[in-house]
Amino acid sequence: MEYSTVTSWVRMIWDALKVDGIDADALFREVGLDPRLLTDPDARYGMQKTVKLWVLAVDRTGDPCFGLTVAAQWHPTTWHALGYAWLASGTLEEALNRLVRYSSMITTAGAFLLEERSSDFRLTVRAQQSEMPRPDAVEDAVLANIVHMCRVTYGADLNPLRVGFSHLGRGCRGKRREYFGSPVEYGCVASGIDFDKDSLRKPLPSANAALAHANDRIIAEYLPRLELGTMESRVKTVLVSLLPSGEATEESLAASMNLSRSSLQRRLREEGTTYRAVLQEVRCELAENMLLDGRKTLNEVSFLLGFADLSAFSRAFKRWTGMAPSNYSESALGIEATPH
């Protein structure tokens, strides 16, 4: 499977090359990328050629900090509808969870995991394996882009607790430390960012629940076109039909797809996910949509999602979203719940 990235994100490389006085169009064509696609919001570039572009761009600029220059070119449209959904999120925790859920809209070459720990949150970047080595600038740009977006919504004074890179930090160490304003570590098992809980849960002044969910719907319409033919998309389709029966187990799912359980696990693992992760994502998305629609009772929603009873659904939904399902639609739309 050829991994891909939305061209609006690669546009930042084009802009950074222009900053350095380099003919960006010529460099794009040199690696086989059509620069005219940069203005098409739905166009995507294959990752092999995009990585070649990164390698050539770093070489031509001679700038070990080129990834930070790229991240500085960010614009809300860089992340398509996800950028606007992020800007309208109620908290940074909500925004980062959107990134985790919808990152494939930006790139299928990696995924994100947000973990709540005892004293902080950790956002981990999980890059897909590739035979082609990627320059350090790619990792720099991804982490710097995320921190930049956090500062756009939270405030310029936001600094992570820690930033970790899987690369060894050849050159540019001083500028990285200055940019992130926090301790920076190198040679980590996985790259990621640690945030304090108060910062991620502080209400954001730019919050607009209706706008955020409008862009969520745009993403939801986009992803099936992107995921067509992937194992994850096929699993999601089958799960929707299996959930009401209460038989959406890994074994029954594999059988309905004419696969062995081990084959299903392997193919999902190759796409960077698992049965449990896809099941939770499908249940959460369906629950949110049905609750916002408002035409089904909580018992009906619980049944359609394959839960044994309403209490099991309520516990799961609160774990996913941090609130009870009975309060979700009012909170999501910014409506104050009526006291009981």
Image: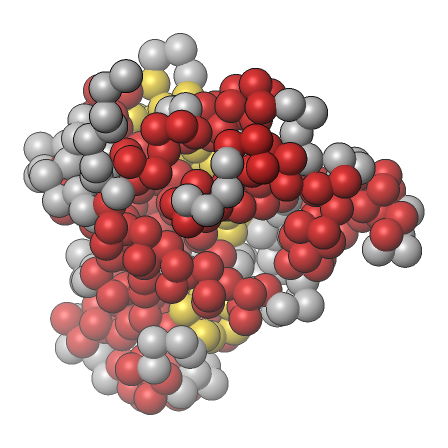
The answer to which of 34 and 66 lies nearer the viewer is 34
Which percent across, then down, holds residue 252?
85, 42
Looking at the image, residue 207 sits to the left or right of residue 224; the answer is left
* Residue 271 at x, y percent in the picture: 65, 52
Residue 165 percent location from the top left of the image: 40, 37
* Residue depicted at 37% across the width and 55% down the height: 216
Using residue 266 as the reference point, say whether residue 160 is left or right of it.
left
Q: Quadrant of residue 335?
A: top left
Q: Give 69 or 37, whichever is nearer the viewer.
A: 37
Give the answer, above or below, for where 104 lies relative to 32: above
Q: What residue sits 58% from the left and 45% below the top?
A: 282
Q: Quadrant of the N terminus?
A: bottom right
Residue at coordinates 17% horizontally, 71% vertically from top-left? Answer: 20
Q: Nearer the viewer, residue 318 or 183?
A: 318
Q: How is the image coloured?
A: secondary structure
Classify 73 as above or below 115: below
Q: Is residue 3 left or right of residue 232?
A: left
